[in-house]
Image: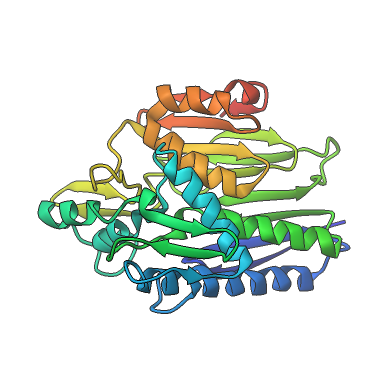
């Protein structure tokens, strides 16, 4: 029984999908169609989408969205309102810096201060019965970029489970979601955790795991260099600048990929000491923190599963 693998490009990244036979290329192409469908709905990198309709009406009126969008937005808003460092209202800041996009630049301090007033998750009003989303201040923008990939990966897993895929890997630009058992005798997967200062695919350690989501936030993913200073794309919505701490990456191991996205962002924002404490208290969420000096800390649930190279 072999693995069938195919690469695609979507969501601004390289997509790598694999399934074990008897699954077929149709299962891979079906997953890719699903990715494109959700990208069309959720993107904020085009003038029009279901999410952009919400943003275009900021300060004007509530906008009704389809149930799947609403559930995702609600998840993102509720976490944002806990004020732990994940903020779905970060849109104006992302658009200002453009890190990872054409025209990336370091904005002026006054431009940043102006945007900070619009980054207010508590000014997002949700109406469950009508499934409406209202951004109460004009200029506000929600950006699901920090959570959409994980959410889409979870949808692909559901799709594959329906089509009978017994073993597969969903890799959306380095965010991994494992489906079923690995083909190894022990049925466990081996996943390399990226060394944040080496080129892609050089692992700092190996995680031995059953089917889980393994999601990483790192400073090496997208960056901008100005006057010899490096700015990465993980923003602090309180300061308007990239998060300043000694972390290079945070990897989350969880059942759902969407939780991996949320908690890797929170872990990154909180830093090792606070981040470890928070994640130890969160059931079903484990983490690997790697500092810029390559010090590694893992939460208690991964002690036996992670081996440093």
Name the quadrant containing residue 102: bottom left
For residue 188, which quarter of the picture?
top right
Report the residue at 44% width, 48% height from top.
199
Residue 173 visible to an observer of this rendering: no
Q: How many marks?
A: 0
In this picture, is 35 found above or below 79?
A: below
Along the line of sight, the residue nearer the viewer: 212 or 258: 258
- Pick whichever, 256 or 183, lies toward us: 256
Towards the viewer: 24 or 113:
113
98 or 122, which lies in front?
Answer: 122
The image quadrant that residue 266 belongs to is top left
Q: Residue 114: image x %, image y %?
A: 17, 56
Q: Position of residue 25 (x, y in %)?
A: 77, 71
Q: Is residue 227 left or right of residue 92?
A: left
On the question of residue 126 being in view, the answer is yes
Residue 15: percent from left, percent from top: 58, 63
Q: Quadrant of the N terminus?
A: bottom right
């Amino acid at each position: 029984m072999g693995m069938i693998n195919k690469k695609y490009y979507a969501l601004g990244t390289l997509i790598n999908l694999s399934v074990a036979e008897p699954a077929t290329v149709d299962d891979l192409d079906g997953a890719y169609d699903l990715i494109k469908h959700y990208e069309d709905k959720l993107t904020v990198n085009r003038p029009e989408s279901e999410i952009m309709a919400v943003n275009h009406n900021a300060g004007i009126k509530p906008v009704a969205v389809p149930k799947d969008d609403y559930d995702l937005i609600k998840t993102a808003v509720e976490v944002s309102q806990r004020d732990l460092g994940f903020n779905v209202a970060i849109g104006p800041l992302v658009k200002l810096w453009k890190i990872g996009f054409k025209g990336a630049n370091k904005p002026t301090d006054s431009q940043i201060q102006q945007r900070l007033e619009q980054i207010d998750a508590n000014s997002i009003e949700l109406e469950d019965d009508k499934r409406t989303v209202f951004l109460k201040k004009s200029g506000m923008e929600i950006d699901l970029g920090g959570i959409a990939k994980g959410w889409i990966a979870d949808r692909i897993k559901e799709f594959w489970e329906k089509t009978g895929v017994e073993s597969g890997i969903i890799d959306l630009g380095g965010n991994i979601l494992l489906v079923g058992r690995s083909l190894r005798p022990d049925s466990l997967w081996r996943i390399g955790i990226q060394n944040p200062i080496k080129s892609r695919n050089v692992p700092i350690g190996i995680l031995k795991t059953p089917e889980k989501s393994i999601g990483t936030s790192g400073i090496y993913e997208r960056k901008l260099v100005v006057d010899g200073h490096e700015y990465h794309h993980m923003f602090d919505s309180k300061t308007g600048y990239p998060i300043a701490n000694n972390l290079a990456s945070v990897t989350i191991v969880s059942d759902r990929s969407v939780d991996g996205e949320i908690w890797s962002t929170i872990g990154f924002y909180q830093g090792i000491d606070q981040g470890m404490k928070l994640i130890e208290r969160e059931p079903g969420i484990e983490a690997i923190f790697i500092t810029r000096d390559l010090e590694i800390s893992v939460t208690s649930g991964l002690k036996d599963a992670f081996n440093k190279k």
